[in-house]
Amino acid sequence: MENMHNFNHPGIPQPLFHRIEQMGLVTPTPIQAQAIPHALNGADILGTAQTGTGKTAAYGIPLVVKLMNQPKGNAIILLPTRELAAQVMQTMQKLIGNSKLPIALLIGGQEMFKQIRQLQANPRLIVGTPGRINDHLKRGTLNLSNTDFLVLDEVDRMLDMGFGVQLDAIARHLTAPKRQTLMFSATLPDNIQKVSAKYLKDPVRISVGSTSSPAEKVKQEQVKISDGEKYGQLLKELDTRTGSILVFVKTKHSADRMASKLQKLGHKADALHGDLRQNRRNRVVADFRKKVYRILVATDVAARGLDIPHIEYVINYDLPQCPEDYIHRIGRTARAGADGVAISFLSPGDGAKWKAIMRLLDPSAKQDNFDTGRSENRNRSQRNHKRRFRSFGGRR
């Protein structure tokens, strides 16, 4: 099937096309150009693409077309985190516009009775997280028997977070005789392919770019440094960089402590992690998006799926435990074709983690000599990333 070259497509109604224009979408991204025609044709899709490549519109546009054309069908979008679900909800509201299609957001941290009230309005589209969706199914407040369009977004992360059993439980409630399912993932490990066999029927496989490498416009830098020098180096990076910065740390306590220390030094900073109440988390994300804060200190789970175009820098103050999370982290910058920089602090104890990340980026590449501080290889998957290695103290 031919790729879509613009959104003025025969399968997209003109009212929806005008809303797409109002959103500032002019030329389809590669994942949109490939996925939308197949989805409009009713095919199941297994799509892999890096974060920030326009996956939400790739499934959102055909979903809205189906709801507009079929007055009795319903749809559900499942996502790994509350923040990502809220962002997708905003995009879907823009696509739906004044079409009067009732929709509901079902995520944790919000009052159940308000969500039940939304469900009593018989929403055509539900956006939510697996945990809260299952809560409603167990209570009997949610009926998915007429839902014939399923989207699983960032399914790799949902499985990493232990939602596999909950996804299966939700699927058992999807009893419509014919169902179209779109599954999207930033990476494609073996477990994703096994899961896809359970949910997808003869899917069209779409892969945009390397699923084990960051976006091409992410410039990667590594700083070898001792643990005791990391905070001082962070301050240097913050003082010499302009623009919005996302700093990753490994624990919720570290995020709070780091944000507090930066605030005392006069930096406009805040923390984002899973222990924050939902209204607080929403406010932190909204303020960062509005540039009220220049620096956001976050944990992996809390920052998963953040879609904020103006993040110029990602700093890995602590390396992630899982190599795939490195891809997701630095995918927060260089969104929608913009340039971005990812800086990773490598302390003496990070050798094994960094080598695992390097193996993920390019399994065939010769490994960097971590102990000597040399960055010897610029392998095939990294040639476009302009990696730069710096050493500060510690082992060289």
Image: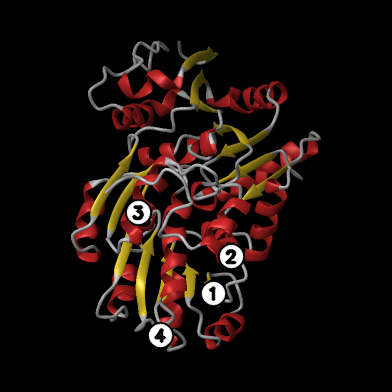
Q: Amino acid at mark 3?
A: Pro
Left or right for 225, reference 214? right
In this rendering, which labeled residue sits more in front, label 4 or label 3?
A: 3
Residue drawn 79% across the image and 38% down it: 264
Q: Is residue 25 above or below residue 387?
A: below
Q: CA distance from mark 3 to mark 1?
A: 24 Å
Q: Nearer the viewer, mark 4 or mark 1?
A: 1
Does residue 265 appear in this view?
yes
225 displayed left or right of 384: right
Marker count (numbered):
4
Packing grade of label 2 (10 A; few <14, some 14-19, many >=20) is: some
Check disc 3 and report the residue beneath it.
37
Q: Earlier in the sequence, mark 3 or mark 1?
A: 3
Quickly name the residue at label 2: 93
How far across and down, in percent of the image, does residue 309 sit? 60, 41
Disc number placed over residue 311 in the picture, else none: none
Crowding at dot 3, Cα within 10 Å, few <14 / some 14-19 / many 20+, comes out as many
Determine whether 248 is above or below 64 in the image. Answer: above
In the depicted structure, whether residue 78 falls above or below residue 192? below
163 over 113 or under it: above or below: above
Q: Nearer the viewer, residue 9 or 124?
A: 9
